[in-house]
Image (cartoon, helix red, strand yellow):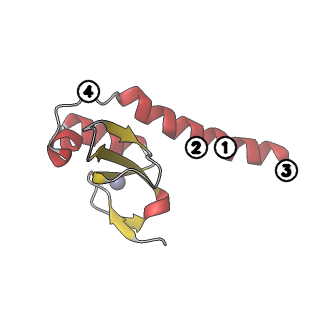
Amino acid sequence: MNRIRKCISCGSLKKRSELIKITKDKTSGNVILMPDSKTFGRSVYLCYNQSCIDNAFKKNRINKTLKTGADINKSDVYDLLTQDLKGTTDEQFKS
Ligand SMILES: [Zn+2]
């Protein structure tokens, strides 16, 4: 299943697997970055790039869309970005 989702920052439509997912868990109310398939709740999607993350935080879009006051750590989201880049770099070094 690879449905098309919309980035809350730039509005571009991408495959779900190409976006960062942030979900507010329906039962606990916790906000989870890249949740597993067992987590259900309202979700937002962001592109894997710094400007989309920056914009979403600047305009407080994540909290507004999720209707939460949760303190989402921007550096946690950035970590996802660097992990992803690291993966790419490793691949390049191998060849
Ligand atoms: Zn975007």
Disc 4 marks which amino acid? Asp
Residue 29 picture location, percent across and down = 24, 38
Q: Secondary structure at mark 3?
A: loop
Q: Residue 55 at x, y = what percent?
A: 26, 41
- For mark 2, what is the residue? 84
- In the displayed structure, 27 sits above or below 79; it is below
Drawn side of residue 93 relative to residue 36, left or right: right
- State which mark lies toward you, 3 or 4: 4
Q: Which mark is residue 71?
A: 4
Q: Position of residue 63 (x, y in %)?
A: 19, 39
Q: Where ligand 1 lies, by quadrant?
A: bottom left
* Front: mark 4 or 2: 4
Determine the CA span between mark 1 and mark 3: 13 Å
**Tag 2: residue type?**
Asp
Q: Are marks 1 and 2 in contact (CB under 8 Å)?
A: yes
Q: Indicate the secondary structure of the residue bearing disc 1.
A: helix
**Residue tagged 3:** 95
- Mark 3, Cα crowd under 10 Å, few <14 / some 14-19 / many 20+, is few
Q: Residue 36 location in percent, x, y?
A: 47, 50
Residue occupied by mark 1: 87
Looking at the rendered structure, the secondary structure element under dot 4 is: loop
> How many numbered marks have been drawn onto this rendered protein structure?
4
* Front-most of residues 29 and 22: 29
Q: Residues within 10 Å of mark 1 (few under 14, many from 20)?
A: few
Cα–Cα span, label 1 and label 2: 5 Å
Viewer-side label of 2, 3: 2
